[in-house]
Image (cartoon, rainbow, N blue to C red):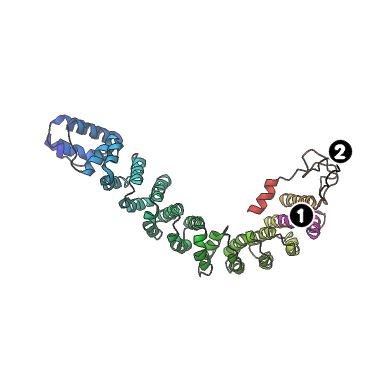
Amino acid sequence: MSTLASAAPPDPDPAVRLATIRALRDSGDPAAPLALGKFLTDSDPAVRKLAATALRALRWEPATAAEHVALAVADGEWSQVRALGTAAVPALCAWLRRPGDSVLPFVLELLVELRDPRAVPPLCRGLKGRDAAVRERFIQALAAFGTRAVRPLIGQLSSDSGPAREGAARALCLIRDPGAVPSLAAGLADPDQCVREVLIEALRAQGKAAVPELRRRLQHAHPLVREGAIRALEGADDPRLVEPLCARLADDYWGVRESAARAVAPFRDRCARKPLCRLLQDPIALVRTAAARALGELEDEGAVEALSLSLMDDCSETRRAAAGALGRIGREPALRALEHRLRRGPNYETIPEVREAIRTAIRWIEEQSRPRASLPIPGTPAAPEREHLPIPGNPVSAALPGDEQGAGASPKAPTVSLWQRWFQR
């Protein structure tokens, strides 16, 4: 049986390996425990379990921490691995090279519990795996290490593996260490769009700590860096950003112009009105649409004329955005422009979705212009409450100009969620 004990490479068939373990257990060969020990790290859990059972039957005692870990993992005795403390870390890290193994979740849990910095580099190497679910486990484990994982993760941002760069950015997004901001901003020129999206999310999660660095990146020579910096600044509550964002509305790259229009709108600064009105003539439809929505958020009456012209834009989505913006701004000139698009004639709107947007905007303006009911005189019956919006099935007194439904019809009531959706895009 000594030949069996020294036989090398295990057979690829699990049934053969199990038979070999049984033969070694019953052989009485002094070298059998050494051969059985090789099966403790087998890829098949059943083989590992049988090898551990055989070694315990032979009263074999592990001599090193690595042997202790191998035997305990094969037996599923994780409490014994936990009792070894940080001495088990190197052996546990060896299991990270088997991303498809069933013990991986338990190994990661123990490494996070021990929080030994020696586990961070092997965890970073695990970000290169192809399985998204496994990478997510590694990302969560690295995030649990907190600031101790920041430097190795920054190193992964320059990896030649796209999944590794994306995973590192996601882990840094969860850690939110301000020291990672310059490296995250430098990666905005990444050729992989998925990586750029995660980097933008990570920078946005940094909040105010990222604003100075992102503001400097607005002048970067690479257009993707400028666009990414603007997108990361969306939602930042810093009035000093209005001027540099308005300057980017004239950028030579359309993605920067579109992003700047979305980012500057929440500030509702009148300084943005003129450059946004100029963007309504942009050759790119996405930019024109973003500008129309931004002008709606500004609610500046000075934009009514430009938005009225956008009601005849070649792009239906831009026309819808312009109708929503005019409805939000209100005023009589906006109402006349909207009604004009519903009249039969050369400027008649033919797209049903745009017509519905115009009708909703008109109803909104008319509702806002209604006088508020005066308080009832004590002792007199209260006047019936005015309906806020038409209810399906109720007759209306008059149809809108150009509405084919005619007077007395029951138009579909616009929903508030649709209105909100126009201004949240």
133 above or below 180? above
Q: Residue 286: in sight, yes or no?
A: no
As drawn, is 284 to the left or to the right of 58? right
Front-lying residue, 187 or 381: 381
The picture quadrant where one finds residue 260 is bottom right
Mark closest to the chain's N terminus, 1 or 2: 1
- Counting from the top left corner in percent of width and height, residue 135 is at 40, 48
Residue extent of the magenta highlight: 324-352
Magenta stretch containing residue 342, yes or no? yes
The picture quadrant where one finds residue 160 is bottom left
- Counting from the top left corner in percent of width and height, residue 46 is at 29, 33
Q: Which residue matches tag 2?
A: 381
Amino acid tagged 1? Glu
Q: Which residue matches tag 1?
A: 349
Secondary element at tag 2: loop
Amino acid tagged 2? Pro
- Counting from the top left corner in percent of width and height, residue 225 is at 51, 64
104 above or below 155? above
